[in-house]
Image (cartoon, rainbow, N blue to C red):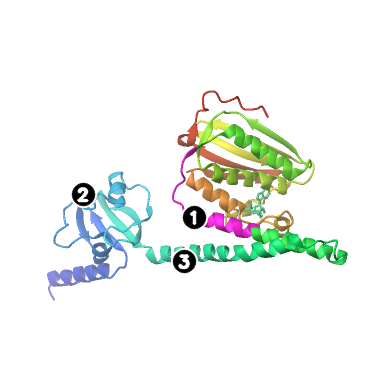
Amino acid sequence: MTRARRLAITLRDLRDAADSLPDAVVLLDEAWRVRWFNQAAETLLGLRRGHDRGVVLSDRLHGSELAAWLRSGARVPLHDIPAPGRPGDHLDVSLQPFGRRQRMLLARDISPLTRLEQIRRDFVANVSHELRTPLTVIHGYLELLDPEDVPTLAPVLAEMRAQSKRMGQIVEDLLTLSRLETQEHVIDERVPMAAMLATMRKEAEALSQGRHRIALETETDCDLLGSPRDLHSALSNLVSNAVRYTPSGGSIVIRWRRMPEGAVYSVSDTGYGIPAGHLSRLTERFYRVSSSRSRETGGTGLGLSIVKHVLNLHQARLSVESTPGKGSTFACHFGAERLLPPESGATDPTPG
Ligand code: ADP
């Protein structure tokens, strides 16, 4: 066999191997023009053999999310974008530099995963919804029963009421999470922070019943832009956790501060604290450092998941600092684009 023939066979084998890949591969030259692509690139990206060689890829995919990403330099990988060649399907895309200023675009079809994720979401939402009515009925009847009618059953009745209330709270939290997960963005409204912070302090005091010292430190009069209902739920979850995981006699400080890159709402406590190994998992559903402590204090294990989802919808992030035995600080970092100057005529924030 001649050398040329051997080379031709190797080339054909390489091309066949690339064509059998389930992922789309597109080789781009230094001017982002298409040099070569495999079969999956035809189905997933809609490229056509004998047509699209030499064209600038972002021009070819004009109007798609992928084209905008390419035009902006394609620096970070893209997650879950619509496949330009197959409507309804979803892709993860990344760009790999190689050789002399050339690039390889890789696109993976993640539609089966997104479909499974959708099934999971629907299932949780449906189960929660189905449980809501029977629970309301049970709860209603339990409220009607008078413990004084059968004093021996009074402790049993109290426990049944507490547990049905707890189940009801879990169902409500799961429904909130389902709603937050399917939402892509929030409807932006002004969230007056002076009033919100005053509510936070009141909620902390009501929950603490005088067992803790509670302070509010307001260092900025900025308001937030976002969903008042969702932000209330996130900010108050942190307050409720601080009270629930701090023994009597401890103190809790709620702060609202301006930072160079935005503003921070934080809640610090002098409570039990959290060992470092747990910190990265706290926002997972039902993740608890101590199940018994969480249950005793009426926790559902879903609070911090809700906080994380609400913050994501506001392009904000949660940070946690904690020392076991000393206490914790949970902080929500909001970007400058989420801040509003106070409305003229608004009163100064009350000092802490
Ligand atoms: P829960 O309903 O169990 O409180 P969360 O999602 O709100 O659920 O919190 C998850 C876990 O994180 C809690 O079970 C608890 O172990 C830990 N945690 C949250 N906040 C604090 C805090 N301020 N101090 C100590 N541990 C905390």
Name the disc covering residue 86, or none: none
Which quarter shows the N terminus?
bottom left
Q: Residue 113 colored magenta?
A: no
Residue 180: % across, % down: 51, 52
Q: Earlier in the sequence, mark 3 or mark 1?
A: 3
Residue at 46 percent across and 63 percent down: it is 117
Residue 302: % across, % down: 61, 55
Q: Secondary structure at mark 1?
A: helix
Report the magenta residues as a range: 169-189
Q: Nearer the viewer, residue 143 or 190?
A: 143
Q: Amino acid at mark 1?
A: Glu
Residue at 67 percent across and 40 percent down: it is 268
From the image, state whether disc 2 or disc 1 is nearer to you: 1
Q: Which residue is mark 3?
A: 119
Q: Report which quarter residue 271 is drawn in.
A: top right
Residue 240: % across, % down: 67, 46
Q: Amino acid at mark 2?
A: Asp
Q: Which residue is mark 1?
A: 181
